[in-house]
Image (spheres, rainbow, N blue to C red):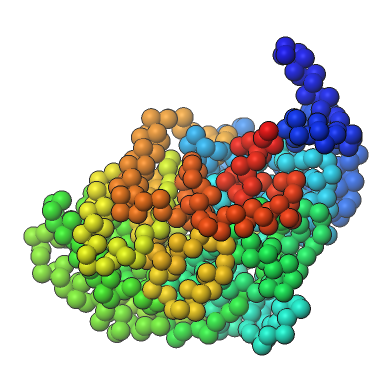
């Protein structure tokens, strides 16, 4: 077929599809193609005006995050650039993404139109409009997706940021259920975890299992399984889900729980955001708040490779004997320059108890001054758990552990952890994760684990996120995790190993944006080389969908394992035509990488 004939044939198919006259046989013979601006079937201005009225005027035409920088010397560009360090500012922008892209994977794309949803009716209207007009739909809440799933060029963006109401319940029973009531919190889809922690912990004196990064969106985290600093005690965020409101591809707003649409409810608990519908609200179980939250910290530098290997071995032994339990979470980093950084947190231990646990390890380090130097003070401490997310109290005492949102219009309770600053606007060069099974902590396997960690660290820093592997958690937390869609490997893993690197913000249009490809490519190879060392002791491991490799060829097995066939069945039932598409989401193998063309 000549090029001109191919174009004419494609236009004929698009027109036929838009008018509903394309036969089933034709659809089977030719991939379905979603329409783009400029296509004959693209909605008319009158069509868009209809959507604007249906959403009470909410429809907007977005511009790029740094569109003002078309004139780099302008005051508007200077203002935008001055706020690119602030995750709240980025999240408040219709085209904002919390990372600025991934080398040779994706960069932020500007939607053709967006609906900043303020009510469920806006969500329904946007879903109906996208379905009936064959549009590419993108769904964004917090915009934290490392995979770039909350943005797409030429799409209709459904943005839930303005839906952020939070209601704390002393007693909650899911609709249609007769079980005993439990304390809970209902959160609309656009809320961030800092707002939820403020409502539940600071003000109500309870605990809800959410994310460690305070500016992550609630809905996205829960749908991806979700882990926070204290998940080793309370399990995943998805495990605490009691009920959800969700708009499915047919435009119906459903209340789903263990009694109503239980298969869809299960899929929302870790099956990945943006694949099954648009979540409008979630109700999560809350827990009794422990008296203490705390931390253990510091950095140790070894003077030689041999000393560093010995340090890794001692830390693994110490972790297995003293920290492999529900009290301890967060991470330790094993650096290529022979440093071990500690950044763990605790729950239920006062300062004296925490220091007593760590003192043997600190003493062991101090006993070998020729081999180890403490480059950042070692220590452990605790404070009242109710103060952990009390931003106003932290401001009063001059805390440096958080960065405050000091914009004039900012909410006073908004801050973010200082340790998360390097994630804001980051441009990723490489990223991968693997759940490491608890069997590696057995005495007979520790040497293999140490060898793998040391070898990996020759290529790149390896972070061990102990709270993101649930082995060592209470039995109830383990069983609740088994009832989610997350890869079952998580309950046998003592940690999630993450290897990643990147650079400063590279948003499209940002003045001074680097065009260097050599360093990003070398960094990506270093991540792959480090992960290969870990794969020697954990072949074909599971991987956490929210923190994973964009290029993972075995993504469905890595993210969901034996749960994937069931998730595909749920997808077929509630979204048979694939309206909801995200990169490496359930059912995405049926579509082109950009989500516009159904594969033959």
Answer whether residue 148 is visible to the viewer in this image: yes
> Residue 222 placed where, x, y %?
59, 64
From the viewer's side, name the closer residue of 291 and 485.
485
Which quadrant holds residue 242?
A: bottom right
> Residue 147 placed where, x, y %?
54, 46
**Quadrant assignment for the C terminus:** top right
From the viewer's side, name the closer residue of 122 and 486.
486
**Quadrant assignment for the N terminus:** top right
Numbered circles on residues, count: 0
> Residue 568 placed where, x, y %?
64, 53
In the rendered image of this protein, does residue 562 appear above or below residue 70?
below
In the rendered image of this protein, does residue 349 appear above or below residue 98?
below
From the viewer's side, name the closer residue of 233 and 448.
448
From the viewer's side, name the closer residue of 452 and 401.
452
Q: Name the residue located 81 percent from the left edge and 31 percent from the top edge.
A: 26
Left or right of 387: which side holds 43? right
Q: Name the residue located 76 percent from the left edge and 78 percent from the top edge.
A: 176
> Residue 594 placed where, x, y %?
63, 37
Which quadrant holds residue 10?
A: top right
Q: Which residue, as the protein is rendered here, is positioned at the far left?
A: 370
Q: Name the residue located 64 percent from the left edge and 65 percent from the top edge.
A: 266
Answer whether residue 408 is visible to the viewer in this image: no
Q: Name the residue located 38 percent from the left edge and 77 percent from the top edge.
A: 327
């Amino acid at each position: 077929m000549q090029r001109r004939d191919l174009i004419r044939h494609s236009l004929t198919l698009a027109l036929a599809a838009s008018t509903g006259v394309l036969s089933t046989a034709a659809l089977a013979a030719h991939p379905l193609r979603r329409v783009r601006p400029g296509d004959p079937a693209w909605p008319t201005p009158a069509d868009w005006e209809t959507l604007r009225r249906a959403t009470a005027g909410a429809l907007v035409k977005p511009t790029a995050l740094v569109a003002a920088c078309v004139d780099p010397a302008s005051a508007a560009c200077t203002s935008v650039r001055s706020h690119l360090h602030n995750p709240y500012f980025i999240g408040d922008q219709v085209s904002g993404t919390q990372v600025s892209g991934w080398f040779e994977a994706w960069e932020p794309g500007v939607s053709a139109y967006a609906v900043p949803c303020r009510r469920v009716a806006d969500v329904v209207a946007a879903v109906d409009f996208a379905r009936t007009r064959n549009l590419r739909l993108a769904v964004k809440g917090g915009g934290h997706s490392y995979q770039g799933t909350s943005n797409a060029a030429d799409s209709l963006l459904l943005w839930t940021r303005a839906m952020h109401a939070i209601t704390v319940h002393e007693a909650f029973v899911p609709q249609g259920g007769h079980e005993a009531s439990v304390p809970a919190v209902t959160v609309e889809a656009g809320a961030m975890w800092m707002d939820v922690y403020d409502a539940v912990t600071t003000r109500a004196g309870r605990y809800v299992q959410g994310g460690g990064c305070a500016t992550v969106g609630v809905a996205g985290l829960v749908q991806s399984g979700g882990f926070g600093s204290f998940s080793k005690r309370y399990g995943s965020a998805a495990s605490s889900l009691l009920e959800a409101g969700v708009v499915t591809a047919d435009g119906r707003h459903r209340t789903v729980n263990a009694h109503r649409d239980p298969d869809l409810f299960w899929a929302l608990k870790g099956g990945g955001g943006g694949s099954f519908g648009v979540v409008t609200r979630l109700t999560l179980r809350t827990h009794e708040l422990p008296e203490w939250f705390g931390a253990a910290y510091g950095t140790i530098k070894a003077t030689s490779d041999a000393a560093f290997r010995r340090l890794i071995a001692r830390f693994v032994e110490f972790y297995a004997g003293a920290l492999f339990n529900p009290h301890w979470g967060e991470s330790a980093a094993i650096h290529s320059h022979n440093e071990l950084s500690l950044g763990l947190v605790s729950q239920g231990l006062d300062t004296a108890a925490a220091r007593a646990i760590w003192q043997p390890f600190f003493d062991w380090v101090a006993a070998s001054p020729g081999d180890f130097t403490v480059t950042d003070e070692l220590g452990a401490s605790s404070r009242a758990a109710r103060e952990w997310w009390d931003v106003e109290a932290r401001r009063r005492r001059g805390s440096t552990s958080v960065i405050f949102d000091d914009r004039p219009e900012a909410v006073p309770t908004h801050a973010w952890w200082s340790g998360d600053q390097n994630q804001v606007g980051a441009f990723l060069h490489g990223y991968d994760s693997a759940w490491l099974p608890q069997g590696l902590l057995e005495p007979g396997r520790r040497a293999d684990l140490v060898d793998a960690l040391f070898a990996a660290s020759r290529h790149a820093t390896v972070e061990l996120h102990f709270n993101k592997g649930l082995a060592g958690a209470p039995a109830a937390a383990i069983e609740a995790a088994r009832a989610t869609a997350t890869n079952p490997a998580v309950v046998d893993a003592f940690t999630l190993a993450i290897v990643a690197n990147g650079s400063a913000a590279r948003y499209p249009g940002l003045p001074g944006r680097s065009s260097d490809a050599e360093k990003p490519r070398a960094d990506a190879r270093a991540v792959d080389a480090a992960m290969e060392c870990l794969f020697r002791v954990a072949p074909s491991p599971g991987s956490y969908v929210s923190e994973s490799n964009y290029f993972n060829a075995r993504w469905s097995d890595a993210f969901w394992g034996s749960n994937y066939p069931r998730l595909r069945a749920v997808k077929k039932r509630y979204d048979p035509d694939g309206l909801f598409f995200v990169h490496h989401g359930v059912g995405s193998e049926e579509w082109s990488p950009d989500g516009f063309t159904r594969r033959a």
